[in-house]
Structure formats: structure tokens, C-alpha cells
Image (cartoon, rainbow, N blue to C red):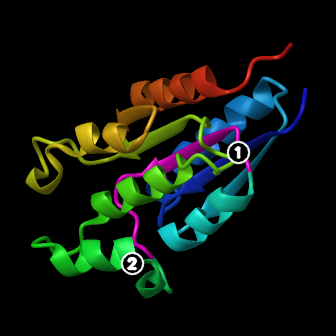
Amino acid sequence: MKELEIAVVDAGLLSGGAWIRSLERDLDKNSIPFEIEGFRNVIPAMEAFASRRYDLIITDLHVAPGFGFEEDPEISRIIADSTEIIPYWKIVCHAISQARTPKSPNRKTPILVATIYHPTDYTLCQDAEIKVREAGATDYLYLVGDSLNIKEFIKRVKSYLPKED
């Protein structure tokens, strides 16, 4: 089996790493070779998405643009036009849409968006699930800190991994 290439976009690499460590343990336990490349900001992730193909992209809903965002006209417009403090979810939607462009090596790569925020708890992103799916996300998962949710996270991730021939 080829080594799986997984990109993770999150300043805290998904809740301080607990979710990713759980995924790594599960993949190791099942003898699934993998490499996880982490990005703490959207700009370097978008640069990688334009040139490197991943088997799966996992992104938090709230990721800062990072240094150099001024060079991306769409991110600059999102920030300038926003009435929110920082419209992270809109920036993530932009990154997803960039991964879905016809020339992107990730135009068909599954993208799982995860968040610790539930729309009823965080009114600024009540329609975020709809918006990220419209941008091209494959799935959306609310991360809640219990073991059942970690199991659901791993189950969802594994459902999008390529199957062995």
C-alpha cells in the first residue's frame, strides 16, 4: 500500500493535537502507512494545495490566513469587507475553493472540515457548514471532546482514504 498523504490545516493542529494523535495511533495500529503535513495558516496550505496532491485534506473551520495574505486579493477583500472581527470561516472557504480549481492536483481530494464550534453556540458561523460545502468541502464534523466523537472523527477520515486494490 502506498503511503497516504494527509494535509492538516489548523493553528492548534486540531485541538492541541489530540485528534491527530488519535488518528495516527489508529493508522499505525492498522498498519496503514501515512504522512501528515501540518499547516498552521491558510496561505502556506494553499501554496501546497496548488502543487502537491494529497489523499485527504482536514481543516479546522477557524484558521488564520498567515503572513503574506495581502498578496491574495480574495483574502484581502474578505478581511476588508468583513463586519466580523476576523472571518476565519470565509478564509477557509476561499482555501477550499482554490483546492477545487480545475488545475489543482486536489480538485477531487476529499476535504473534511472540523470545528469545535457548534452553530448554536457560535452565531457568527451559523451557516458555515452550508458555505464550506458550497466551496467544495466533502464533509463537516463538529469536534466535541469525548471519546465517541474521536471515534467518529477517525471513522470519517478512514471513509475518505483510498481503498487498497
Marker count (numbered): 2
Q: Residue furthest top?
A: 165
Q: Which mark is residue 54?
A: 1
Q: Residue at x 40, y 64 (%)?
A: 63
x and y, in percent, of residue 66 in the image: 47, 79
Please give the residue where the numbered disc 2 appears in the rendered image.
73
Say which quarter of the image contains residue 92: bottom left
Magenta stretch: includes residue 55? yes
SS under mark 1: loop
User: Does residue 74 sit above or below 98 in this rendering?
Assistant: below
User: Does residue 124 sit above or below 153 in this rendering?
Assistant: below
- Foreground disc of the pair 2, 1: 2
x and y, in percent, of residue 82 in the image: 16, 73
Q: Residue type at mark 1? A: Tyr
Question: Which quadrant of the rendered structure holds the C terminus?
Answer: top right
SS under mark 2: helix
Which residue is more in the foreground, 27 or 43? 43
User: Does residue 133 sit above or below 165 in this rendering?
Assistant: below
Task: Point out the stretch of residues depicted in magenta.
Answer: 53-65
For residue 96, side relative to residue 99 (left or right): left
x and y, in percent, of residue 51 in the image: 73, 60
Residue 143 visible to an observer of this rendering? no
Circle 2 Cα neighbour tier, 10 Å, few/some/many (<14 / 14–19 / ≥20): few
Q: Residue at x 21, y 81 (%)?
A: 80
Q: Residue type at mark 2? A: Pro
Separation (CA) of disc 2 from disc 1? 25 Å
